[in-house]
Amino acid sequence: MATPITIGAAGGEYMESVVVTKWHVSRGARVCAGDLLAEVETAKAVTEVEAPCDGVLGEICAGEGDEIAVDATLGFLLAEGEDDAGAGGNAGTGGNAGAGGNAGAARDAPPAARPEAEASGGGRTDRVVASPLARRRARAAGLDLRQVTGSGPGGRIKRRDVEAVLARGPRAAGGALPVMLLHGFAADATTWSGLVAELGRGRRLIRPDLPGHGAAAPAGGGFEAVVAPLLEALDAVEAPRLHLVGHSLGGAVALSLAGARPARVASLTLIAPAGLGPEIDGPAVDGLCRATRPESLLPWLRRLVADPRRIGDDYARAAMAGRVEAVRAAQAALADRLFPDGTQALDLRSALAECPLPLRVIWGRDDAILPWRQALAAPGHAALNLLPGVGHMPHVEAPELVARLLRETVTAAEATGVQ
């Protein structure tokens, strides 16, 4: 029987609701009793929620950013081999109708249309005191709460304080537009962790999973089916514009989004993007799709980087943990459509050449998956960075440099008044 994950004492006395700020594990992950599962925030502090028993994380009933009642069920832990088909019904009667009913929305919405957003940096120092409604409104608008003066008791920021800053325009709000990060094929949103740690505080980062990756449902079609839910996610961001960053397949998606919504995109950064030539390491793509054990996945993961010593057994085990049979099947079907017979079916060279946006292309000179010379398709106004000693994963292999280049791009775009 599924064991509910509850907030328990984390809500504190006299608290009616909490905000889920972070999930540390993904659906399908095996955990032990006492393992850290999630963090929730009250008006006073951030508290960790631990696993009540050993099990496998099943349904997640409250997503990051959701405000829920203190007696709500965050999710369910399943016994080994247990099906969570019935857990959702239990959740419906478990008090999950938190403030605003967001827990139900988090459970029912397609994962790819629910971009993950978080303030980068991850530290808890200088944490501002704000109401859950104020935090949610600021997060949706890409506003750094440190730019807001609270009018509540003890300087607590209330929603009206956030609205007052937003009403004064983007410069009063700090001018920091959100950044959407789109990962590559056979990866998930966690691949951006190193870059997130380097970007510093004060900017909202949105990290959705591509369809058929991570927690997102399969696309069920070709490239257009991959792009469609990400376009919905972009349209759902409550900010005047945002910056797009995409790696590999995510780079191709980012380029397509920019072409579909140029007025919504402040800048475009492409990291070893797909779609700029027919060449691709077909055996590596096939190996990533077929691997069923960490031992068989490891050599293909090492093809992604210039120095294979960067990828060890622990990395392979962590990567394999989320690659359940359904995910592998979805990715194999997608690869067959996008990379048939070891070639790229996508051709976005004309879209890149005609892109009028502030543009940067970053590529590793030792990329064994996609040849760096495909970067030469970039138009003359693009900033082009070819990184020596770096393979197909510049944001993983050289996160400090990539973060600096990204900061230069977004700062220059915002300085020109593109908001």
Image: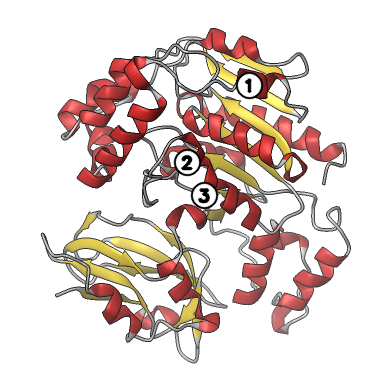
Left or right: residue 316 versus residue 64 is left
Residue 154 seen by the camera: yes
The residues tagged by marks 3 and 2 sit, at their Cα atoms, a distance apart of 7 Å
Count residues near mark 2 (Cα–Cα under 10 Å), then give few for <14, some for 14-19, many for 20+.
many
Count residues near mark 3 (Cα–Cα under 10 Å), then give few for <14, some for 14-19, many for 20+.
many
- Per the rendering, the mark at residue 361 is 1
Left or right: residue 268 versus residue 223 is right
Compared with 232, 414 (above or below) is above
Look at 59% across and 35% down and name the residue there.
254
Looking at this view, name the residue that lies furthest to the top.
373
Instruction: Label 2, secondary structure: give it.
Output: helix
User: Looking at numbered disc 3 in the image, what kind of residue is underneath it?
Assistant: Pro
Q: What percent of the width, then of the height, locates residue 315?
A: 28, 34
Look at 63% across and 16% down and name the residue there.
385
Compared with 2, 170 (above or below) is above
User: Looking at numbered disc 2 in the image, what kind of residue is underneath it?
Assistant: Val
Instruction: Label 3, secondary structure: give it.
Output: helix
The residues tagged by marks 1 and 2 sit, at their Cα atoms, a distance apart of 22 Å
Left or right: residue 74 versus residue 207 is left
Circles 3 and 2 in contact, beta carbons < 8 Å: yes
Instruction: Label 1, secondary structure: give it.
Output: strand
User: Looking at numbered disc 1 in the image, what kind of residue is underneath it?
Assistant: Val
Look at 28% across and 16% down and name the residue there.
283
Residue ID for mark 2:
226
Residue ID for mark 3:
229
Q: State which quadrant residue 159 falls in.
A: bottom right
Mark nearer the N terminus (3 vs 1): 3
The residues tagged by marks 3 and 1 sit, at their Cα atoms, a distance apart of 24 Å
Q: What percent of the width, then of the height, locates residue 20?
A: 47, 69
Quarter the N terminus occupies: bottom left
Dot in front, 3 or 1: 3
